Structures are given as structure tokens and as C-alpha cells.
Image (spheres, rainbow, N blue to C red):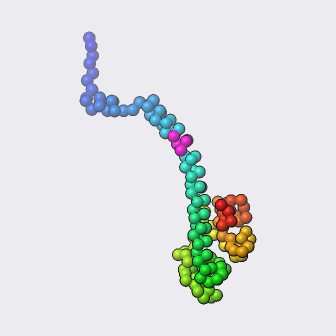
């Protein structure tokens, strides 16, 4: 004697559509391997992008400082002079910048005239990722 169990058609369709535990583990393993390969490369790119942004900011501020010098015959005492006209700048044609940018790590750019690295000009730098001036990670108009 044979016993037949009839399942409703929806139960059969649901059974055929389900994933097995082995298939799920295989997919999770593949995703884990891909993440292990991709994530370290993406993390290095963000720091590289911050360094490139700092160099670009320094270049644009340098252009504004040079324009100030052409108009007035001397470099400003501070970066604030690029936004607000100082008393001693008679040919000021600014503002030379819309606002003073901060570096990609949230610190203000450091400006010194005359410069220590550029005694005939100015030093313009970012304190870099560590936030401390005078360390190896500083980015300035005297570095590449």
C-alpha cells in the first residue's frame, strides 16, 4: 500500500525557490573575500584624496597671495587680508578668496611672511593628518 501526500501547489513553489544553507554560506564567503580585497584599497584612496585636496588648496591660496602682491607690491601680513582690506593696502582689489579654507583634516592653513623655507617669499602649509606643525606629514608650498 502506497501512501501519497499531496502538498498544495504554493508549498511546492516555495520549496523550489528557497536557498540551501550551503548556497547561503558560499555567497557569504564570496562577499567576505571581495570585501577583504576591496576595503583596504578604498581606505588608502581616501587619505590620498585628502593629500591631493590639501595641495590643491595651497595652490589656490598661493594664487590669491600672488594676486595680492601684484596689486599692492607686498604680501599680506595674514590670510585674513585676502578677504578684508587692510589699512596699508591702497590698491586692494579683493576679496581674493571667498572664504578662508580649512585643510581636509579641519585645521586652518598656516601662513608666514617672510617664510622660513622661502625667505624671499612666504610659507603656506597644512599641519597634515596629525594636526601638529613641524612634523614629517606637513604639506607646504615648499614640498611636492
Q: Position of residue 92 (x, y in %)?
A: 58, 84
Q: Residue at x 62, y 88 (%)?
A: 87
Left or right: where does residue 94 sit relative to residue 18? right
Count all numbered tags in the image, as a single digit: 0
Q: Residue at x 68, y 59 (%)?
A: 137
Question: Main SS type for the magenta part?
Answer: helix
Quadrant where the N terminus sits is top left
**Is residue 95 at least partly visible in the picture?**
yes
Left or right: where does residue 5 sit relative to residue 32? left
Q: Position of residue 20 (x, y in %)?
A: 41, 30
Q: Residue at x 58, y 86 (%)?
A: 91
**Is residue 106 at least partly visible in the picture?**
no
Q: Position of residue 132 (x, y in %)?
A: 70, 64
Quadrant where the C terminus sits is bottom right
Query: Is 42 above or below relative to 127?
Result: above
Q: Nearer the viewer, residue 114 or 70?
A: 70
Residue 46: quarter of image: bottom right
Q: Residue at x 27, y 16 (%)?
A: 3
**Residue 48 magenta-highlighted:** no
Residue segment shown in magenta: 34-38
Q: Nearer the viewer, residue 29 or 91?
A: 91
Query: Is 80 above or below relative to 46?
Result: below
Left or right: where does residue 13 sit relative to residue 111? left
Q: Nearer the viewer, residue 106 or 84?
A: 84
Amino acid at each position: 500500500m502506497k501512501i501519497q501526500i499531496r502538498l498544495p501547489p504554493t508549498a511546492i513553489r516555495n520549496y523550489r525557490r528557497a536557498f540551501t544553507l550551503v548556497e547561503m554560506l558560499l555567497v557569504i564567503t564570496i562577499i567576505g573575500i571581495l570585501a577583504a580585497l576591496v576595503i583596504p584599497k578604498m581606505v588608502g584612496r581616501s587619505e590620498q584624496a585628502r593629500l591631493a585636496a590639501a595641495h590643491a588648496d595651497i595652490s589656490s591660496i598661493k594664487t590669491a597671495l600672488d594676486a595680492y602682491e601684484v596689486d599692492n607690491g607686498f604680501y599680506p601680513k595674514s590670510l585674513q587680508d585676502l578677504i578684508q582690506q587692510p589699512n596699508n593696502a591702497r590698491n586692494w582689489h579683493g576679496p581674493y578668496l571667498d572664504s578662508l579654507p580649512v585643510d581636509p583634516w579641519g585645521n586652518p592653513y598656516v601662513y608666514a611672511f617672510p617664510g622660513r623655507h622661502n625667505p624671499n617669499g612666504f610659507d603656506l602649509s597644512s599641519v597634515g593628518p596629525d594636526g601638529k606643525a613641524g612634523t614629517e606629514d606637513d604639506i607646504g608650498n615648499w614640498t611636492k
